[in-house]
């Protein structure tokens, strides 16, 4: 049996898979024969993942073995738990006395690393499964309904969706069980778009650091390193423009509008929907929000004195793209460059179907 990540493959097999080593074998172990020492995991259940439910599932079919190691000489119990405390707790609640276990001859350092990797692997699978459920719900529910169902913010929803569309190096953090931190995974995704070589080196450094690597600090340092300098603010006109507030940097609003425009892009480009119908299905608040955000790019195009430079800056800052949310921003900017084209949300939405 394999503990392969069903989304990306690979994962913790190198630590938990059967290797043909005579010091590694499977047994049905008595729970009373297992000593449970200090574990990485501290929370064992929540309202959606009850131990009693897991116990009933284990009685019917245990799909994954717990990991144990021979205990130290002189110990009261013959085995020491490495990974699987939640399954042990659930089995006891269900009244079970034995579990399928894989015995591995590990050092203290190897056992510690195995615990960390197994914990990260579990978190990654939980988050990916949740993201898939959210993606499915978004097909039939509004974003407000989905946010209420999962009790999450727009920002969190956007980041969870980002787990389903990861480039190579960001994907490695999940596939190789290096991090389950959504913030870090999405940050590596951004770094990779700006500088793939630095992203690869970053993930290599995280991997070489092992269980003791401070992933957030490493990612933060590289993100600051590759972040392009902000363009100098243009000289403001003597008289303030009527829509002066719309000329400010639109980036802080990207996460707020990302989900709305991602759904619009899917409906328009992938499902060949009609722009007007897509626009009509938006709530008034969502429509106003994306109009303000896209108008900022239109205004930037109108005011641009060096279109090539401005486009490159926006591309380096991950604002423009050929697909997805960035395609709408690029289209709005292009309409602004055309001095004869008035701002039209309908035209901008329709342009991504080209």
Image: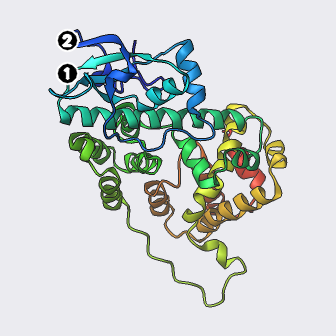
Category of crowding for the residue at label 2, using alpha-carbon neighbours closer than 10 angstroms: few (below 14), some (14–19), many (at least 20): few
Would you place residue 209 above or below residue 155 in this image? above
Which residue lies under the disc numbered 1?
105
Residue 64 visible:
yes
Which residue lies under the disc numbered 2?
21
The image shows a total of numbered marks equal to: 2
**CB of mark 1 within 8 Å of CB of mark 2?**
yes
- Nearest the viewer among 96 and 107 is 96
- Nearest the viewer among 160 and 33 is 33
Seen in the image, is 19 located left or right of residue 1? left
Seen in the image, is 198 located left or right of residue 45? left
Q: Is mark 1 on a helix, strand or loop?
A: loop
Q: Where residue 260 sits in the image (x, y, percent)? A: 69, 49
Residue 82 picture quarter? top left
Q: Where residue 64 sits in the image (x, y, percent)? A: 43, 18
Category of crowding for the residue at label 1, using alpha-carbon neighbours closer than 10 angstroms: few (below 14), some (14–19), many (at least 20): some
Residue 60 picture quarter? top right
Residue 264 picture quarter? top right
Say which of marks 1 and 2 sits in front: 1
Labels 1 and 2: the sequence-earlier one: 2
Residue 164 visible:
no
> Disc 1 and disc 2: Cα gap in Å?
10 Å
Seen in the image, is 160 located left or right of residue 85? right
Residue at x 47%, y 47% (from the top left corner): 182
- Nearest the viewer among 253 and 306 is 253
């Amino acid at each position: 049996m394999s503990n392969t990540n069903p989304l990306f493959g690979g994962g913790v097999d190198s630590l938990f898979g059967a290797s043909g080593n005579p010091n590694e074998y499977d047994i049905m172990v008595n729970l009373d024969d297992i000593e449970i020492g200090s574990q990485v995991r501290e929370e064992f259940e929540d309202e959606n993942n009850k131990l009693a439910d897991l116990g009933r599932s284990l009685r019917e079919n245990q799909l994954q073995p717990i990991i144990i190691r021979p205990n130290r000489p002189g110990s009261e119990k013959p085995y020491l738990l490495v990974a699987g405390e939640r399954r042990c707790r659930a089995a006891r609640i269900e009244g079970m006395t034995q579990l399928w276990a894989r015995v591995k001859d590990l050092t203290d350092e190897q056992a510690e690393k195995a615990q960390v990797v197994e914990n990260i692997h579990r978190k990654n699978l939980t988050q990916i499964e949740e993201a898939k459920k959210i993606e499915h719900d978004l097909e039939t529910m509004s974003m407000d309904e989905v946010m209420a169902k999962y009790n999450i913010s727009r920002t969190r929803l956007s980041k969870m969706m980002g787990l389903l569309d990861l480039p190579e190096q960001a994907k490695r953090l999940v596939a190789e069980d290096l991090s389950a931190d959504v913030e870090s995974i999405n940050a590596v995704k951004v770094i990779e778009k700006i500088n793939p070589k630095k992203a690869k080196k970053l993930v290599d450094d995280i991997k070489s650091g092992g269980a003791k690597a401070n992933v957030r600090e490493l990612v933060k340092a590289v993100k600051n390193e590759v972040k392009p300098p902000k363009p100098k603010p243009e000289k403001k006109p003597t008289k303030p423009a009527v829509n002066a507030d719309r000329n400010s940097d639109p980036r802080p609003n990207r996460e707020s509008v990302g989900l709305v425009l991602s759904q619009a892009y899917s409906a328009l480009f992938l499902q060949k929907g009609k722009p007007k119908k897509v626009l009509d299905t938006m709530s008034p608040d969502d429509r106003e929000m994306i109009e303000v955000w896209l108008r900022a790019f239109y205004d930037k195009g109108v005011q641009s004195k060096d279109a090539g430079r401005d486009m490159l800056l926006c591309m380096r800052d991950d604002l423009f793209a050929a697909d997805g949310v960035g395609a709408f921003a690029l289209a709005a900017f292009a309409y602004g460059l055309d001095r004869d084209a008035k701002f039209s949300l309908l035209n901008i939405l329709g342009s991504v179907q080209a």
